[in-house]
Amino acid sequence: MLEMSQASTPQTEPHGNGISSGQPLRVLIVSALYPKPDNPAYGAFVRAQEDTLRQHGVDVSLLIIRGDSTFGKYSKGLRELHARLETETYDVLHAHYSYPAAIARTQRKVPLVMTLHGSDLLGRIGDSGTTTPISVLDRKLAQSLAVVCDAVTVQNQTMARMLPRNDAFIVPMEINLQLFQPMDRTAARQQLGLDPTRRYLLFGANPQEARKGFAFAGAVYERLKQRFRDLDWLVIYKEPPERLMLYLNAADALIFPSFQEGSPVLVKQSLACNLPVVATGVGDIPELLGGVAGCAVCPRDIDCFGQHLATVLEHPHRVEGRSVAERFSPGATFTKLMEVYTYAMRRFEQRTKSSKGSTQ
């Protein structure tokens, strides 16, 4: 695995691409997750990375895979991809998640980068809190694709160790530090129409998504409610980033009892706003929260969550989390992505030369 701060940029760059020619780098992002009018939070992290690339001069195009059925939408995506490649040229295809990467791998004209976010490699979580049977197939697909992609990025070291290659790049998704900043709690509550005198516990995920642990969070809330009669909780998951920032500044704490994560963007956004977080130790959460006083990592235990959240709610305060969040700035992510893209283009060129040599 390659920690991006340690990965070296290739000394010789591929010929004929934006990096070496002085022309803007042309990247086609392929994803099934992307914000929708009725759900601005859906795949917002993909949109954030798109914005980062554009702001740094990259020529970005999108192929968003959507439809009513899995087979139908990916069949349509496959046709659209090959139609695009007949008329457009790209330096890199960047596929988010394994299913879009499988579509992108059906072509051999352009270097392919696959980003695995978590469930596509770690497995899907069912209502029982355990991985579903189809997770075995998902994992095998991701691992098989990792072998044939020119570069792979993952969210944490655990994911990197699950791949059958030792050069996976660890590139956690960035956050918008200009938007997610600390602000006055009373002012944030006023904008949201929340009572300035009450305590608020925030749960920021879809309650229907089993891996997020909504039922467990509800049990913790009911326990805390016995002690703090003025406690309410906020359950949000379809808010646009601008309103999400207000909620993170209005709340007294974030409860994050997830069964599984890669590198959760919401936790990093909370730290950027200096909001106390109590979470399970999944993904890179232990590294994110480990050095932040006032935050805590707990096992899936109501007493542990209740104790740490009660400490926060007893004397509401802010934590010093922003310095941790600043490691995930758009600028830092852009630098990492350029290393990944250069690496992918170099491998593609080497593979192409090797293939031509073997046919001569």
Image (tube, rainbow, N blue to C red):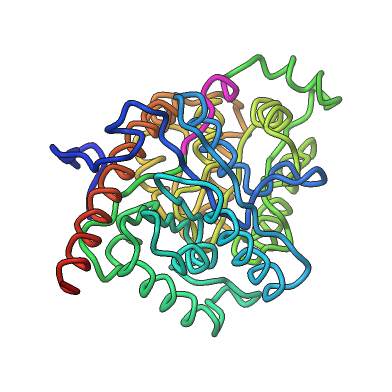
Q: Position of residue 52 (x, y in %)?
A: 49, 30
Residue 262 falls in image quadrant: bottom left
Quarter placement of the N terminus? bottom left
- Whether residue 235 can be seen here: no
Front-most of 94 and 308? 94
Front-most of 6 and 317? 6
The mark total stands at 0
Q: Position of residue 23 (x, y in %)?
A: 38, 28
Q: Which residues are magenta?
A: 174-181
Front-most of 49 and 261? 49
Residue 315 falls in image quadrant: top right
Residue 6 falls in image quadrant: top left
* Residue occupying image coordinates x 45% and y 38%: 26
- Whether residue 313 can be seen here: yes
Would residue 58 be found to the left or right of residue 246 on screen?
left
* Residue occupying image coordinates x 22% and y 68%: 355
* Residue occupying image coordinates x 33% and y 31%: 335
Quarter placement of the C terminus? bottom left
Q: Which residue in the rendered view is the most extreme toward the right? A: 193
Would residue 286 be found to the left or right of residue 211 on screen?
left
Front-most of 75 and 121? 75
User: Is residue 133 depicted above or below 258 in this figure?
Assistant: below
Q: Is 106 inside the magenta-drawn segment?
A: no
The dominant secondary structure in magenta is loop
Would residue 94 be found to the left or right of residue 248 on screen?
left
* Residue occupying image coordinates x 67% and y 76%: 71
User: Is residue 327 depicted above or below 163 in this figure?
Assistant: above
